[in-house]
Image (tube, grey):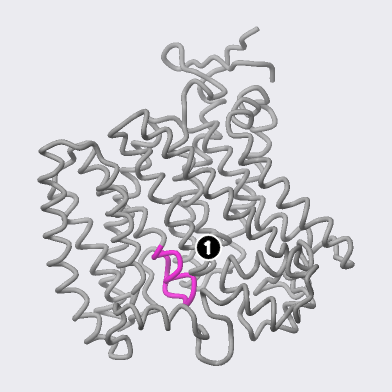
Amino acid sequence: MDLIVKTGKLRFPKYLVCFQLIYVCFVQLLISAGLPSALTLLCDAVNIVLLFYLLIYTKGTARVIHKYLPFYVIYFLFFLIGTVTALFNNGELILWLWSLRNFGRFVVFFTAALVFIDPKDFRKIRKAVYVIAHISFVLCAYQFLVKKLKGDYIGGVFGTTKGPANTYLNVFLVIVFALALTDWLCRNKGFIHFAVICCECISVAVVGELKFFFIEMVIVALICLALAKKTYKMFSKVLFIVTIGIVLLGVSVPIMYRMFPSFNDFFHVDTIMKNVTESYTGSGDLGRLTAIPEISTRLFKGDLSKIIFGIGLGNGEYSDSHRILQSAFYLKYKDINYVWFTDAIVMVQNGLAGVALFVLWIFYVAKELFVRFSRKRNNGMILTAFAVSVISLFLFVYNISLNCEIAYLIYAFMAFGLIDPDFMGYNRIRKNRYVLKGDL
């Protein structure tokens, strides 16, 4: 029996998802202004409420889980392996719960986005992202020209705290650029709009010293151009983008070299490989591409069981603010800076099995998005989501992006590409009312 529910009761979780995305874009600005870092815990409160609504709308939630069952099975195995390993390594309950929160919160939010967001909501979210991008560009200009900041201290709407500012900004720029490019390619959104967004992203990347953004931008562009519907008009767009891209890179890269002399010749292959394989800070800590093998030899001392399964979920956890959430392993090896990379944290706690599962869920989502796009050619929402999923593989080893608050945006935008009204928990039947399929 279908239950009729007033719109207001069903709009609330939808608004919570949108609030979470906007809040993540501004919370670090508030923290860098002097407010407590505990403000990020509001994201957890929102997630708990969303989980409550997911449990209430059991039929809709169950249908989404059934449709994308491999995703949830992969994550279940990830948590199961980590939990069993933690039991064998005398794991502490509070640290296990903290690690469960750190990884599980995004699964909840991913599911909520699938259940409560529809394509019309995505159009509104896309507009909001563009507005935030323009605000961020203005703030970056202010931070650079007035406050005389640059490099790691420029974050636009993400504040000026070294670490979060750069990390969050990089992810945001990738999403904004992908949105603008797919809008132009798939929705024929004006080229001027795309050009403005592109120039803003490049300008912010230059003053924010986001060297790898230029590589990510090229990857996103290649993906979108390769998959976009092939027409004569599209071919002319591709040719134009390539020409403009070469010009913009030719102008912006020398400017970055002039502003940051230490990065001269960064975009040479040898320099890039040296940057990602050597110590991140040059003081003996892990490198981006060498984190996993170095953990195996330097931290696990070749112990095969630890290499395969890690030391257990929670046993490598940390918190900058709360001593009780800092594991003994973290206190012993924090100078190695393994907590700066998602793949390193996963390797420490869940071993190679956990790394494989984490990469597998990204591949699964990317595969699902690719299949959906092949059936619905020229769908910008799906193409954007696919580009974000591919970049997520890069972010897995690049920094901590997939394990901090900015990951809410990553998971949400991947979920947006998988949204299917036929598998949502409710469908609108007339103005101001909805039908909820299933029992409360």
The residue nearer to you, when weighing 170 against 344, is: 344
Residue 104 versus residue 352 in the image, above or below: above
Residue 310 versus residue 54 in the image, above or below: below
Which structural element holds mark 1? helix
Which segment did they paint magenta? 158-170
Question: Residue, x 48% and y 41% (percent of image)?
Answer: 367
Answer with left or right where residue 95 lies relative to residue 200.
right
Report which quarter residue 51 is drawn in. top right
Report which quarter residue 171 is drawn in. bottom left
On whether residue 168 falls in the magenta region, the answer is yes
Residue under label 1:
396
Question: Residue, x 32% and y 86% (percent of image)?
Answer: 263
Quarter holding the N terminus is top right
On whether residue 424 falls in the magenta region, the answer is no
The residue nearer to you, when weighing 69 against 252, is: 69
Residue 23 versus residue 382 in the image, above or below: below
Question: Residue, x 79% and y 68% (percent of image)?
Answer: 311
